[in-house]
Image (cartoon, grey):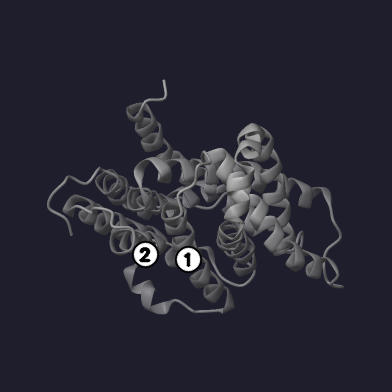
Amino acid sequence: MNSPESRERRALWLLWITPALWSVNYIVARTAPGVVEPHMLALGRWALAGVILGFIARSELWRERRSSLRVAWQYLVLGALGMLICGAWVYLSAQTTTAMNIALIYAASPVLIALGAVLWLGERFSWRQGLGVLVAMAGVFHVVVKGQWAALGQVQWVAGDGWIVVAMIAWAGFSLLQKKWPSPLGATARLATICMGGVLVLLPFAAWEWQQAETPLWSMQATWLVVGAGLVPGVGAYWAYGFCQKVLGASRVAASLYLGPLYGGLTAWVVLGESLGWHHVMGAGLILPGIYLASRQAPASPEI
């Protein structure tokens, strides 16, 4: 069945799964320095994702080729925001900043998305959703500061923090523009087209990295990083996010990003052997009900 009700149910389930897929990118970002350069990694990731998605949606892409070409500039903009800035620049930031800083800064992106959806896209935002955002944000901060709220005043800003600030703003723009620019393409075909735009934007940067003397020689480990990043946080996470946004709206889907720091901590514990503290448990106790409230459909009245 593909009724609106069944599509909404699938989208609501995917809200919880998508951040887990994205958490694989934490492992990739931590492993990549010294193995593969940021823009080369992003190029390989999105080229692979684009080929897979393009093959799946080949009939639709061919059928809508003329309408897609008419708005090709939109796909270049989305590719620059989603694949260059939110892809390569995140890998670049991981060379100099900490995972705590990345999670803390990215935690602000759902606020920008929700605010933009209300002010720019005219979406409804109920008081329950507002409460959910506040509760979830409290949980996010509790996780990223490891339960030590005084640590907020001790954050040391480095070059990587600046890259993440730009990426956070770009992600909000990427999310809102997908809603602002409706497309006849389905989620798979649209993401494939955005990948094409991202590859075109990334090519000159990756070519420049390839020519640098300090660039590491290509290795099997680099190949595995590209494949892993392309399949899981690439095809899986971006497709799921795009599907959810098309069904539920930008402000509701933005709330799912609050799960990112929590899932990232679990990934680090299971895969990287980092310790799992009580602050993760307490953070989950705030984040999970916050996500539930923030993802509920806003009623016709009143709004905030």
Instruction: Answer whether residue 283 is visible to the viewer in this image.
Output: yes
Residue 199 lies, in percent from the top left, at 70, 56
- Dot 1 or dot 2: first in sequence order is 2
The C terminus sits in image quarter: bottom left
The kind of residue tagged 1 is Met
Left/right placement of residue 182 relative to residue 78 reads left
Residue 243 position in % (x across, y down): 46, 40
Quick one: label 1, few (<14), some, or many (20+) residues within 10 Å?
A: many
Total residue callouts: 2
At 32% across and 28% down in the image, what residue appears? 5
- Residue at left offset 45%, top offset 56%: 175
To which residue does mark 1 refer? 168
Which is more toward the observer, 139 or 302?
302
According to the picture, the residue beneath numbered tag 2 turns out to be: 112
Can residue 234 be seen in the rendering of this structure? Answer: no
Q: Residue 60, percent across and down?
A: 60, 35
- Dot 1 falls on a residue whose secondary structure is helix
Q: Are marks 1 and 2 in contact (CB under 8 Å)?
A: yes
Q: Quadrant of residue 26?
A: bottom right
